[in-house]
Amino acid sequence: MADATRCAIPLAEIAEGQMLVRSINGREVVICRTQHGIYALDNVCTHAYARLNEGRLRGTRLICPLHGASFDVRDGRPLGAPATRPLTTHDLRIVAGRIEVALRPDAAEPQSG
């Protein structure tokens, strides 16, 4: 994980079934904690510009607040229309009680909206 794209968040800041947003190098990333694990994805819906953290997290399903598109937080794949393109997922690890998130190399530029 490259230091330039890393963000560390205390694990205690996010409870199971919750999500939070952090900006990493100008890119909004939503961190989702489920009973299956912790995941980091782009925070903007691939169907229409909407901030996913304003939607709902139901198990491993992240639901967009705008048109109801849904995504699997484990791999970013779309689960329900109208989205057809997956969300970009980002690497993360837990070190000494902190979540470290690193942007994928192909996602280093901020999204325009």
Image: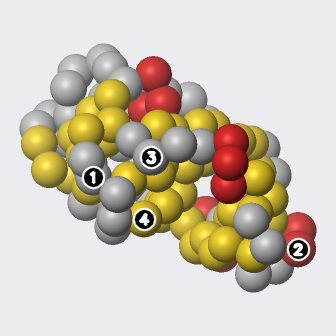
Tell me: residue 50, above or below residue 102: above
Sequence-first tag of 1 and 3: 3
Q: Find numbered disc 2 in the image and state the secondary structure of the residue it sits on.
A: helix
Q: CA distance from mark 2 to mark 3?
A: 27 Å
Q: CA distance from mark 1 to mark 3?
A: 11 Å
Tell me: residue 73, above or below residue 113: below
Q: Find numbered disc 4 in the image and state the secondary structure of the residue it sits on.
A: strand
Sequence-first tag of 2 and 3: 2
Please tell me which residue is depicted at 27% across the width and 33% down the height of the picture.
63
Please tell me which residue is depicted at 43% across the width and 32% down the height of the picture.
52
Please tell me which residue is depicted at 88% across the width and 74% down the height of the picture.
3
What's the residue type where badge 1 is placed? Answer: Thr
Tags 4 and 2 touching, CB below 8 Å:
no
What's the residue type where badge 3 is placed? Answer: Glu
Sequence-first tag of 4 and 3: 3
Sequence-first tag of 4 and 1: 4
Residue topped by disc 1: 60
| Residue 103 place in picture, x, y as percent | 66, 66
Q: Residue furthest bottom?
A: 1
Q: Find numbered disc 1 in the image and state the secondary structure of the residue it sits on.
A: loop
From the image, which quarter does the N terminus lie in? bottom right
Residue topped by disc 2: 3
Residue topped by disc 3: 16
Tag nearer the camera, 4 or 1:
4
Left or right of 48 in this view: 2: right
Q: Residues within 10 Å of mark 2 (few under 14, many from 20)?
A: few
Q: In this orientation, which residue lies closer to the viewer: 65 or 34? A: 34
What's the residue type where badge 4 is placed? Answer: Gly
Residue 38 badge: none
